[in-house]
Image (tube, rainbow, N blue to C red):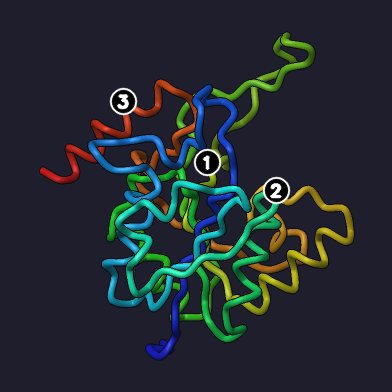
Amino acid sequence: MNKSVSFTAVIPAAGIGQRMACDYPKQYLPINGQAMLSHSVRLFLEHPAIERVVVALNCQDQWFSGLEIANHSKISTVIGGEQRVDSVLAALDVIESNQWVLVHDAARPCLVKDDLDKLITLAKNNQCAILASPVRDTMKRAVSGIIDHTVDRNELWHAMTPQSFPCGKLRQVLREALIAGVNVTDEASAMEWAGEAVHLVTARQDNLKVTHPEDLALAEFILARQKR
């Protein structure tokens, strides 16, 4: 095990969250008195293994500077891009290639330390990995809104974040994938395309991504329960 591995968290936060139907980006919506983004970043700021947190912001962002975390010594910011992959690349460009990065959604405020520690342990063993959860529901494939067939769920997983990779390798693969026209939906999808082995780490089901308005109340409940 390589105990000298250095870690930087990358938080792409340049999106506008159109599905939340609000007047400002969803990562700034309040949850239990703090912006969602503050909750999503907090664990990385508190964790002793994380040396730095790079947040990719929209060029017109006017909210981040007002957050308490904006002045934290671990925090630095970059200007993100139109797509998630553009924001991640902007962050990777200011991180040393020999670092390991943990890319985490700005809209996942309920991450717990135990799950983060699992990824860090694998990285110290030079293993790329993402948090994920096995699919529990019956899965259907549809054509024009009509069920075509039932999909075997036994090997299906919900991809989550953080996703952990060596910075230099991830930067190279993301650029090559974009040139090749690959649909990069998350960092793991690019690494898969490049033939890299990416481990699945079973995470807590409550590592919720806030996407729709009704998710806010659930996130508030989860965070309040975690605090207790």
* Residue where numbered disc 1 is placed: 158
The residue sitting at the top extreme is 146
Q: Which of marks 2 and 1 is in front?
A: 2
Relative to 207, 94 lies left or right? right
Badge 2 local density, few (<14 within 10 Å), some, or many (20+)?
few
Image x and y of residue 58, in percent: 60, 50
Quarter of image, res 156: top right
Amino acid at the residue labelled 1: His
**How far apart are the two marked residues, 3 and 1, measured between alpha carbons?**
21 Å
Q: Which of 27 and 67 is in front in this view?
A: 67
Label of residue 83 in the image: 2
**How far apart are the two marked residues, 2 and 1, measured between alpha carbons?**
21 Å
**How far apart are the two marked residues, 2 and 3, measured between alpha carbons?**
27 Å
User: For numbered disc 1, what is the local secondary structure?
Assistant: strand
Image x and y of residue 23, in percent: 51, 27
Quarter of image, res 50: bottom left
User: For numbered disc 3, what is the local secondary structure?
Assistant: helix
- Residue contact between numbered discs 2 and 1, judged by CB atoms under 8 Å: no
Relative to 80, 201 lies left or right? left
Q: Which residue is drawn at 41% across and 87% down?
A: 1
User: For numbered disc 2, what is the local secondary structure?
Assistant: loop
Q: Earlier in the sequence, mark 2 or mark 1?
A: 2
* Residue where numbered disc 3 is placed: 217
Relative to 88, 210 lies left or right? left
Amino acid at the residue labelled 3: Ala
Q: Which of 3 and 49 is in front in this view?
A: 49
Image x and y of residue 60, in percent: 60, 48
Amino acid at the residue labelled 2: Gln
Badge 3 local density, few (<14 within 10 Å), some, or many (20+)?
few
Q: Which of marks 3 and 1 is in front?
A: 3
